[in-house]
Image: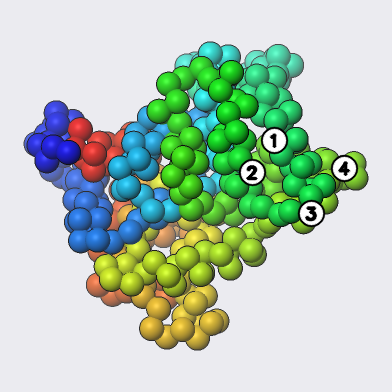
């Protein structure tokens, strides 16, 4: 693989010299230094990063082993696959700021669910996945087997049943890249996603057992075991895109191991970067500066810390481009 920097990287290095731009450059170089030294990296996905098509850059990060584990919301878990199978049916609304309540209602009536300027088509996205994932849930339920939410998604992707629907180049699906590598994923709060809601509906109707899908406590126990086994040497970094549960949940594994499991030699997170436009005020945890995490036993005094207060849909692909030498 060439060590020569591509045009995007050269542009960033030449122009991104101050303020948030410089923070982006520093964070990218810190990430690269951590990986080059043999460290591992967790990426956490909040917001609607899959619908923003982060897979275009994240999938290649996964293929090139520049991410060791992902924590994401249930929405990000499913919406990358929805984009894979229903891309041509998505509806873009560039004038979304001008929509009236009636305009929004009309979108609902036409089975479009809006995420900022992009509407996800219910029939081609949600229902297309539902018929296939339900069979996988049901088969596990009948066999008395239990799996994590992402494991069910991996089974569906690797079975090939969705290939008939592919509408984008599959190399741009981060979930497909993750499934092919069996990349570790934790999905805290999966229950609030569309697939989580659909699973709950089958439970309420008495068609599935709630325990067929493993939940958050089991994810934390699994993550604790993974962290202990992978944090030696240069340690594990934490690259947080957006705020919310996808970041808040996994970062707590370190103080839990140290304080509650009394593992006093457990390493802190070895690198920390957060891309967020959340303001640091009014108790906003998502907007808290990294130093606050020292007091919670998550980061060490000397952990390299970066915060890029900007739009993650712009910043993350640029940092990934640097790491991929594009």
Q: Which mark is residue 133?
A: 1
Camera sees residue 145: yes
Residue closest to the eye, 113 or 30: 30
- Chain-order first, disc 1 or disc 3: 1
Q: Which residue is drawn at the image coordinates 79% and 54% (left, top)?
A: 144
- Chain-order first, disc 4 or disc 1: 1
Callout 1–callout 2 Cβ contact below 8 Å: yes
Disc 4 on helix, strand or loop? loop
Disc 1 on helix, strand or loop? helix
Q: Mark 4 points at which residue?
A: 207
Q: Which residue is drawn at the image coordinates 55% and 35% (left, top)?
A: 158
In the image: residue 204, left or right of residue 267: right
Residue closest to the eye, 128 or 159: 159
In the image: residue 247, left or right of residue 16: right
Camera sees residue 45: no
Q: Distance between the residues labelled 1 and 3?
A: 16 Å
* Disc 2 residue crowd, few under 14, some 14–19, many 20+, Cα 10 Å: some
**Of labels 3 and 4, the one closer to you:** 3
Callout 3–callout 2 Cβ contact below 8 Å: no
Disc 2 on helix, strand or loop? helix
Image quarter for residue 214? bottom right
- Chain-order first, disc 1 or disc 2: 1
Q: Name the residue under label 3.
A: 144
- Chain-order first, disc 3 or disc 4: 3
Disc 3 on helix, strand or loop? loop
Q: Which mark is residue 118?
A: none
Residue closest to the eye, 216 or 17: 216
Q: Which mark is residue 152?
A: 2
Residue closest to the eye, 139 or 268: 139
């Amino acid at each position: 693989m060439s060590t020569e920097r591509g045009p995007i990287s050269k542009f960033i290095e030449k122009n991104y010299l101050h303020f948030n731009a410089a923070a982006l450059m520093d964070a990218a170089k810190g990430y690269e230094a951590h990986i080059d030294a043999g460290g591992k990296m967790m990426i956490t996905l909040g917001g609607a990063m899959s619908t923003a098509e982060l897979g275009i850059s994240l999938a290649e990060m996964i293929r090139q082993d520049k991410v060791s584990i992902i924590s994401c919301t249930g929405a990000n878990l499913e919406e990358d696959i929805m984009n894979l199978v229903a891309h041509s049916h998505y509806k873009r609304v560039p004038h979304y700021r001008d929509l009236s309540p009636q305009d929004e209602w009309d979108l609902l009536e036409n089975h479009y669910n809006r995420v900022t300027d992009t509407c996800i088509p219910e029939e081609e996205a949600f229902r297309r996945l539902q018929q296939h994932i339900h069979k996988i849930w049901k088969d596990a339920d009948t066999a008395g087997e239990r799996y994590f939410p992402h494991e069910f998604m991996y089974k569906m992707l690797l079975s090939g049943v969705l290939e008939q629907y592919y509408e984008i180049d599959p190399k741009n699906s981060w979930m497909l890249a993750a499934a092919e590598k069996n990349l570790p994923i934790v999905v805290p709060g999966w229950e609030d996603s569309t697939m989580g809601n659909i699973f709950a509906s089958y439970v309420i109707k008495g068609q599935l057992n709630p325990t067929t899908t493993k939940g958050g406590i089991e994810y934390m126990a699994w993550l604790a075991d993974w962290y202990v086994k992978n944090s030696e040497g240069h340690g594990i970094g934490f690259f947080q895109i957006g705020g919310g549960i996808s970041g808040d949940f996994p970062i707590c594994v370190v103080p839990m191991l140290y304080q509650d499991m009394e593992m006093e030699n457990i390493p802190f997170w070895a690198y920390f970067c957060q891309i967020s436009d959340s303001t640091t005020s009014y108790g906003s945890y998502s907007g808290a500066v990294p130093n606050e995490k020292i007091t919670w036993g998550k980061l060490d005094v000397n952990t390299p810390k970066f915060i890029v207060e900007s739009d993650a849909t712009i910043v993350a692909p640029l940092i990934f481009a640097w790491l991929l030498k594009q």
